[in-house]
Amino acid sequence: MSVKSADAKRASKERAALRRKAPARQEIPSPRTAEAERMSQFTLKMRESLHRELARMALDAGMTMRGFIMSALQSKGLSVNDHDLIDRRKRD
């Protein structure tokens, strides 16, 4: 047996022994778990008057239109999480 082959075999046995002794790995949640799912986009056509009314209601609620709509979807039972409600507009 060559020296390289013997070293590789010994290293493999050592790794296997360490795996047997190591505690089971626990899943560590990613801090970006909410973003793990791909985002999708769609266009919604509506009358300008309805758009203005929606914008006014969102403003009165202190929310963006996106946040306002996501909140409405959440109230209807869809699985909208807090991260979905965050205002993602860039601020200066």
Image (cartoon, rainbow, N blue to C red):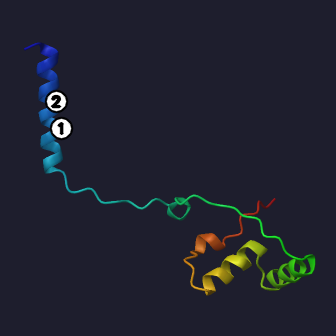
Q: Quadrant of residue 38?
A: bottom right
Q: Secondary structure at mark 2?
A: helix
Nearest the viewer among 66 and 88 is 66
Q: Position of residue 47 (x, y in %)?
A: 89, 77
Q: Which residue does the numbered mark 2 point to in the structure image?
A: 11
Q: Residues within 10 Å of mark 2 (few under 14, many from 20)?
A: few
Look at the numbered discs 1 and 2 and tell me whether their residues touch, using CB distance below 8 Å.
yes
The count of marks equals: 2
Q: Residue at x 18, y 51 (%)?
A: 22
Q: Which label is found at residue 82?
A: none
On screen, residue 12 versus residue 90, left or right, reads: left
On screen, residue 57 versus residue 40, left or right, reads: right
Q: Secondary structure at mark 1?
A: helix
Q: Position of residue 57 (x, y in %)?
A: 82, 85
Q: Which residue does the numbered mark 1 point to in the structure image?
A: 15
Q: Residues within 10 Å of mark 1 (few under 14, many from 20)?
A: few
Residue at the extreme top: 2
Q: Position of residue 55 (x, y in %)?
A: 85, 78
Q: Quadrant of residue 88?
A: bottom right
Badge 1 amino acid: Arg
Q: Residue at x 13, y 50 (%)?
A: 21
